[in-house]
Image (cartoon, helix red, strand yellow):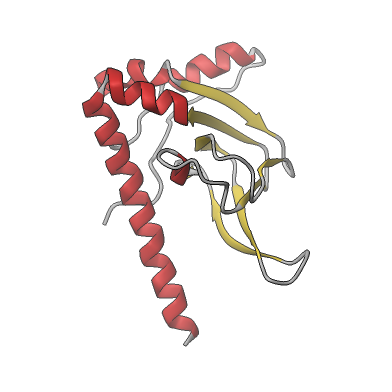
Amino acid sequence: MVPESFGVLSGVVMTHDSECFCERLKGELSFYFLRQEDSPIISELLECRKVAAGEVLWREGDACDCLAFIVSGRLEIRKQTEFPGKDVIVGIYGKGSIVGELCLLSGHERFVTVAALEDADLLLLSRENFQRLTRQAPELSVRLLQGVLLAVSTRLGKSFERLASVF
């Protein structure tokens, strides 16, 4: 079974220089679906972002413009219920996971709210940069989509199991 986590980085040391830190993150990018020669190509298209504990990355209904690879920290995924002001936690994801993956192909609004449970380091891939990737390196974009599809199908399978256990 393919893990939901992508086993992102190993041996990353934080520095005070955010640009240096960002380059180090990108330089050590190693998702299971990427080949060694893919890292320089995809790293050019990624944006580093530090998120403080409690900070909202995006809210349900926001424009869908990027996905995030979690390098460190944990993010909470919440969905609004039919009761005003009441959300349900639908997932907590940590290092090696992807969130916001549905945005790669759709221009829909965000389906969920994502907030940092603890300080987190993320690598963001915008829809625009993904489209550039599909033109410049189609084989790499296919591998990326295959990795995302595996993560989504794993999550869906776990959701089915949780639903079945309720009944």
Q: Quadrant of the N terminus?
A: bottom left
Closest to the observer: 14 or 120?
120
Residue at position x 35%, y 34% in the image: 31
Residue 36 position (above or below residue 56): above
Would residue 72 appear left or right of 62 to someone viewing this image?
A: left
Would residue 42 appear left or right of 55 to someone viewing this image?
A: left
Seen from this angle, which residue lies furthest bottom? 167
Seen from this angle, which residue lies furthest front? 107
**Residue 133 found in image quarter:** top left
Q: Where's residue 65, x and y in %? A: 54, 34
Image mark count: 0
Residue at position x 32%, y 48% in the image: 149
Residue at position x 42%, y 81% in the image: 164
Seen from this angle, which residue lies furthest left? 139
Q: Where's residue 104, x and y in %? A: 42, 38
Closest to the observer: 107 or 85?
107
Residue at position x 57%, y 48% in the image: 110
Q: Where's residue 68, x and y in %? A: 51, 36
Visible in this render: residue 104? Answer: yes
Closest to the observer: 33 or 138?
138
Q: Where's residue 55, x and y in %? A: 73, 40
Visible in this render: residue 35? Answer: no
Would residue 57 appear left or right of 142 to someone viewing this image?
A: right
